[in-house]
Image: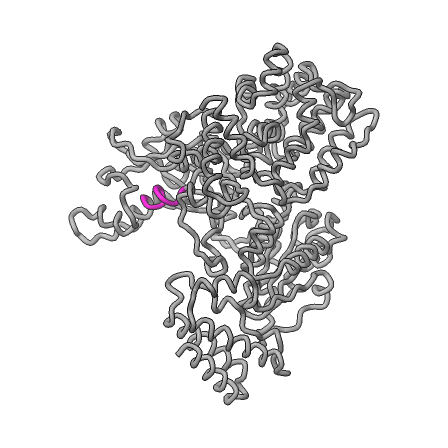
Amino acid sequence: MSDEHAEGLHTVSAPSRPRPDMELAAEIGPLIAQMLGDGRSLIDPGTTIWTASAAEDLRARIGDNPLVGTQQGQWDKLDKQLEGASREVVLLAAELAFLREHPVRSALPETRRGHVERVLAHLKSPVDIPHSMATWLSRPAGTAGFEPGQAYNGSLWRHVIWASTFVRYWSGLPDAERANARNDPWQLQKVMLDSGDDRSDIRNALQFLARPDVFEPISSARMKEQIRTGLADRIGGPSGNGAIAIDRDLLAIRGALAHEVDGPFHFWTPGVRELWDPSPTPSEDPEASAGAEEPRPRHYWLYSPGAQASEWGEFSSDNLMGLGWDDIDDLSHFGSREAMRQALDKDGTGAANTNASLALWQFQNEICVGDIVFAKRGRQEIIGRGVVTSEARYEPERESFRHMRSVDWTHVGTWPHPGTAVMKTLTDVTRHREYVEQLETLVAGETEPEPPVVVIELPGYDKEAFLSEVYLSEDGYDRLSTLLIRKKNAILAGPPGVGKTFAAKRLAYSMMGAKDPNRVQTVQFHQSYSYEDFMMGYRPTESGGFVLAEGPFYRFCEAARDDDDRPYFFIIDEINRGNISKIFGELLMLIEADKRGQDLRLLYKNETFSVPPNVHIIGMMNTADRSLAVLDYALRRRFGFFQMSPGFGSTGFVRWQQQAGSPSLDALVTVVGDLNQAISEDPALGPGFAIGHSYLSKPLNGDADDAWLYSVVEDELVPLLEEYWFDEPSKAEEWASKLRTAVA
């Protein structure tokens, strides 16, 4: 691509770039100009900080004095490394901390400001954050920027080392070369790449901030390559495989798509993502396919590299994992697990081959880049831990183990397996949380494991995305999100079928600014649920003794505490089915908004505990279940309540109704509207027993035809009315007749 062509693409693609992203980068132009120009501090203009000496001092304090271990967080470690630092070094660290977090979409404004102030506290003569930077730091989360992969947020020290190395290198360049790089984005990128060992995530962030008209708001190099590969046909194929070639191709692709896509877009905007993402296209109706677009969290696998780890020598040294069953060709040719099973049964014996077919299917289709693999020898020994870094591939030239993936084996050694491992070659152990934690502690020990080499960019999500998926008004969303921010705890109350569960998770995503399943956890209360299940308690062991086991809420709070610059959301389904006082115990006080961060001694453990301020609790309450008792008043005081009603008149449902073009559906919606009015006016029922819109949302599997509508009426709505009016059978029959007539 010539420079003249690239300049033309800047002009063509400019209108396609979302305005909030451009403003986010443009507003800090003065800081970037000083970083690449006269070197003065933005916080303290009288001090020059972007110098080789300050940068080398900062790099040495961190790179030459690494503080390993998990006892301290990354900001605690930075505090120790900055002790006694000069004014120039402290100001440089503060402005670098600001730059790395400024483009992070989900970072909370109070956390971003807190980190800058924390670094500035090391100054002997205090300084106030200037008004311009204070304005930038007040930007609400979820409004602009990128959502980083899992390694970005935990890599403060790596980012500071890379940025310091770049500043040192930049300061040593001739004036003419620096002037050229300030004017030419590709020269600036080349200088960044030439400055030392590349750290692509922070480099991509700074490139975007410096030239948002050229570089995408994407930190993950893998995602950039994936997008480029999926859309390269629009520019006649890829121009190369290096970072510069990929970014040039992305600019050309944006220019090509600008003629196809109306209005500004990200590469993960609905309608654009489907052009490069090979994952299945979700249902047109989001509420009918609640699970279709759910991001997949990291999975954990137990794996045997050959019988008694026969292949471990090669695999551990060459960063590989592979499966045998060499009689089967390329696994990508098989469309189902059953097809693999039949291929394994070459003699037609009817053998089930259950474990073999499952291992092959999971290896090819279910393992994802970024997953963690624990290698084992036999059933008593763990010999390695690694991060998957490639998709599955077939290597026919190998003598054996031709089904291969690449893995970064971060830990190689020998550790006694806790108990006896399963015999299977490959096992997904993700759902066994305590077992996974045991393996991580066993292998990683007290040493901080390296973050994944390849990170997964999370799809962005905001208020607009929420309103396009959830049948709720904009005013309703604003009130609900404000309630959750203010109270920290909210309950979505309403009759069955109004999308409470769907809305709760989407609300969390919208307030995080991304679909990050690692920061959302869901549990369901029931009559037997207890404090021991929720928080912690003693559980029996196989040997006949008891062990203190941590519950989901305890583990969730500890994870959120270690990531306090981002919001976390704990969702409780059927919250009114449990005995609240029994389940929450001392937590009833700790979950209050004004008690967050306060410590209280735990019932079962000799330690103090607090609920972190960044944990938000969302409960769901079914208002139409007669078997449930009235909520505990103590709980009512601690939660805000938001009433959810049927959304038949919402923009989203009306759009789906129009797309369906079904007279029967239209007639049924009208009857259900009248029915809900009758239910609301019935003194024995009321609005809390109304029929929700989810009953008539697009079916997940199958067509929205008359047969489906008839089944909804006969198998769901009529039995529900018979329960509602069990003491008035004639009334139930009257409305059942009206519903049947609508779909006749």
* Left or right of 419 in this view: 216: right
Q: Is residue 121 above or below residue 373?
A: above
Number of labels in the image equals 0
Q: Quadrant of the N terminus?
A: top left
Residue displayed at 40% across by 66% down: 704
Q: Nearer the viewer, residue 426 or 469?
A: 469
Q: Is residue 134 left or right of residue 396?
A: right
Locate the C terminus and report the quarter of the image it occupies.
bottom left
Question: Does the stretch in magenta take in 208?
Answer: no
- Magenta stretch contains residue 363: yes
Stretch in magenta: 360-367
Compared with 659, 30 (above or below) is above
Residue 703 location, quadrant: bottom left
Q: Is residue 104 above or below residue 283?
A: above
Measuring from the top left, give residue 63's x and y in whole percent.
62, 21
* Image vertical order of residue 629 relative to residue 418, above or below: below
Camera-side residue of 312 and 417: 312
The residue positioned 50% from the left and 53% from the top of the image is 541
Asked whether residue 77 appears in the rendered view, the answer is no
Residue in view at x 45 percent, y 25 percent: 245
Estimate the x, y position of residue 259 in percent, counting from the top left.
46, 40
Residue 458 shows in this picture: yes
Observer-nearest of 121 and 733? 733
Could you say which is closer to the camera, residue 373 or residue 722?
Answer: 722
Q: Quadrant of residue 625?
A: bottom right
- The percent position of residue 633, horizontal first and vertical second, equals 72, 68
Point 68% across, 33% down: residue: 27
Spot the residue most to the top.
174
